[in-house]
């Protein structure tokens, strides 16, 4: 029987929820290879228009515990800054990610990332994926702070 592992991240940010969502979720396939090539080498579009049902293929860098992954958008609500997607990759039967960006009183946001994976080969694989996700959110936040007109 396949084992199931899950984790949750809550990351506060000085960047507004809509802006962070556009960069971290809607344009991640473009930003990740530029800002963190050790996480994502490159990405290409497989099918869809960017919304629900869209599939992208990613070649991963050395910081990620697998060589490649395919990501499918299962749910997307840009106005509410929420999405759900599934990932297929080496060593993981299925991986489901739920991401919500919520505004904070100071004009920033909090990202809530929940990941549940089945068929994980090793617990350290999940830990590395969690660390990579946290790094990507922080890297994109730093990019957005340094580029205040990006993703407005």
Image (tube, grey):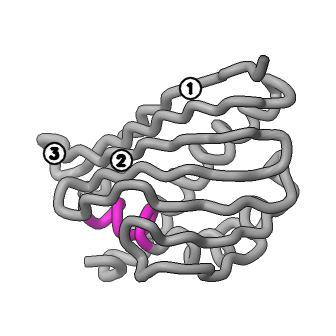
In front: label 1 or label 3: 1
Other residues around mark 3 within 10 Å, as few (<14) / some (14–19) / many (≥20):
few
Q: Secondary structure at mark 2?
A: strand
Does 146 sit left or right of 107 as displayed?
A: right
Using the image as rendered, state which of residue 45 and residue 130 is in the foreground.
45
* x and y percentages locating residue 67 in the rendered image: 86, 59
Report, in whole angstroms, how far the alpha carbon at label 1 lies from the one at label 2.
19 Å
Other residues around mark 1 within 10 Å, as few (<14) / some (14–19) / many (≥20):
some
Other residues around mark 2 within 10 Å, as few (<14) / some (14–19) / many (≥20):
many
- Figure quadrant of residue 62: bottom right
Circle 1 sits on which residue? 7
Does 139 sit left or right of 5 as displayed?
A: left
In front: label 1 or label 2: 1
Name which of mark 3 and mark 2 comes first in the sequence. Answer: 2
Inspect this view and state whether residue 145 appears: no
Q: Which residues are magenta?
A: 18-26
Residue at coordinates 16% horizontally, 45% vertically from top-left? 106
Using the image as rendered, state which of residue 38 and residue 81 is in the foreground.
81
Circle 2 sits on which residue? 13
Using the image as rendered, state which of residue 49 and residue 40 is in the foreground.
49
User: Which SS type dominates the magenta stretch?
Assistant: helix
Residue at coordinates 59% horizontally, 55% vertically from top-left? 136
Inspect this view and state whether residue 148 appears: yes
| Tag 1 near tag 2, CB within 8 Å | no
Circle 3 sits on which residue? 106
Name which of mark 1 and mark 3 comes first in the sequence. Answer: 1
- Is residue 55 magenta-colored? no
Using the image as rendered, state which of residue 131 and residue 92 is in the foreground.
92
């Amino acid at each position: 029987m396949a084992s199931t592992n899950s984790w949750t991240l809550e990351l506060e940010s000085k960047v507004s929820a809509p802006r962070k969502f556009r960069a971290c979720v809607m344009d991640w396939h473009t930003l990740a290879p530029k800002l963190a090539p050790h996480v994502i080498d490159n990405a290409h579009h497989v099918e869809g228009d960017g919304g629900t049902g869209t599939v992208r293929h990613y070649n991963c860098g050395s910081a990620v515990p697998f060589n490649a992954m395919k990501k499918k958008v299962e749910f997307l609500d840009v106005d509410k800054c929420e999405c759900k997607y599934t990932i297929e990759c080496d060593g993981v039967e299925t991986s489901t990610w739920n991401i919500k960006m919520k505004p904070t009183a100071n004009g920033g946001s909090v990202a809530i990332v929940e990941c549940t994976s089945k068929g994980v080969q090793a617990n350290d694989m999940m830990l590395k994926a969690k660390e990579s996700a946290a790094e990507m959110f922080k890297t994109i936040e730093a990019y957005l702070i340094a580029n205040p007109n990006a993703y407005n």
